[in-house]
Image (cartoon, rainbow, N blue to C red):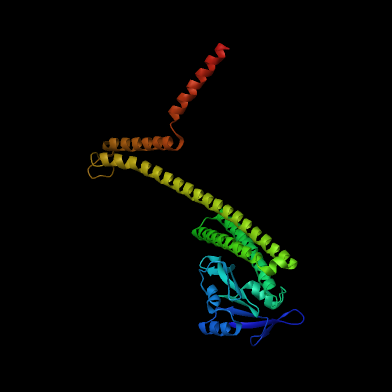
Amino acid sequence: MVKFFVTAANGEIEKTDKFSENCWVDMVNPTDDECEDVSAVTGVPEDMLKAALDEEERARSEFDEGCNLFIVDCPIMEEGDFGDSYTTLPLAVIYNKRCVVTVCLKGNTVLKDFITGRERVSCAKPVHFALTFMLGNAKRFLYCLKQIDRKNHRIQNEMGKMMRNEEIIQLLDLQNSLVYFSTSLNSNERVHEKLSKAEAVTLNEDYRDLFDDVCIENRQAIETCNIYKSILSVTMDAYGSVISNNSNDNMRKLTIITILLAVPTMIAGFWGMNMPVPFEKGVEFYQTGWFWLVILATIALTAALAVVIVKGNPFKSALKQKKKHKKDRKNDKEK
């Protein structure tokens, strides 16, 4: 899809039906025919127009045949099975003496602000257009980072009540998003450095001030992203330790139950077939004394073993306590 915009006399962006000098050409997921037509009327090489159509394209800058290309990564939100997640998508800002061209696979929020008039730009000033977009893009990163932090706090509150796999997967998605953001912000910073060397920026004080704002916002986004990434990494490690401790507790309980059941099972295996048992045909009650003795011995041994496993050896503790009392009495006598 290709749209053409111009700056009206009152400074607002207006849509037009065809190309004109000093216009803005907005291309969203264009076809090969659209790229060819736009290249013919704008003078922008077709390979520049198609550069940002690759989702894996890295942020970079290129200068060729009077055309300036700046590809920056932009934050986008995607819907997943376990909630919304964030990633980045390349967007190209290309300008020459005739026009400004933006190319992206999906619609961009910052460009929509240009169209709706929330942010004032001039299509006749391509450098100002590019700097304003980069400033808005850096602010968009900060907004998405705040949303990620809020979602992180919400997930942690839910995990405090009940820990489920769904919340852990959501935290993993947020961690992946922060990795994408960190890489993209650092790549964008290198593109900003290239733009700072442009003659139009170095010779215009207003452009230099705008470029300084871009650098400040992008640096703030980088630092914020690093902080959130460190916090989320520590959080994931902490929840990993909690899950490991819970697993260890469960295994300990199962082990104790297994040991306790092993004692009566073993004794029953030794004696079950070698003595008269109650209600057996031809066996009187007075003949089952050994059976009841074995049952009582099994219960007593199991109870004693349970006490030793759960609370430790009480005889050993008593012996230590007795030795401690003797030592204290000896010290009192010496004094």
Q: How many marks?
A: 0
**Residue found farthest to the bottom:** 17
**Residue 146 versus residue 248: which sits nearer the camera?**
146
**Residue 248 versus residue 104: which sits nearer the camera?**
104
In the rendered image, the vertical position of residue 230 relative to residue 127, given as above or below: above
Q: Position of residue 148 (x, y in %)?
A: 60, 61
Which quarter of the figure has residue 134? bottom right
Residue drawn at point x = 35 percent, y = 36 percent: 296
Residue drawn at point x = 56 percent, y = 14 percent: 332
Residue drawn at point x = 33 percent, y = 42 percent: 262
**Residue found farthest to the top:** 334
**Residue 134 versus residue 66: which sits nearer the camera?**
66
Q: Position of residue 163 (x, y in %)?
A: 52, 55
Q: Position of residue 10 (x, y in %)?
A: 77, 80
**Residue found farthest to the right:** 10
Report the quarter where the C terminus lies: top right
Report the quarter where the N terminus lies: bottom right
Q: Position of residue 236 (x, y in %)?
A: 53, 53
In the rendered image, the vertical position of residue 200 relative to residue 22, given as above or below: above
In the rendered image, the vertical position of residue 116 relative to residue 308, given as above or below: below
**Residue 209 versus residue 140: which sits nearer the camera?**
209
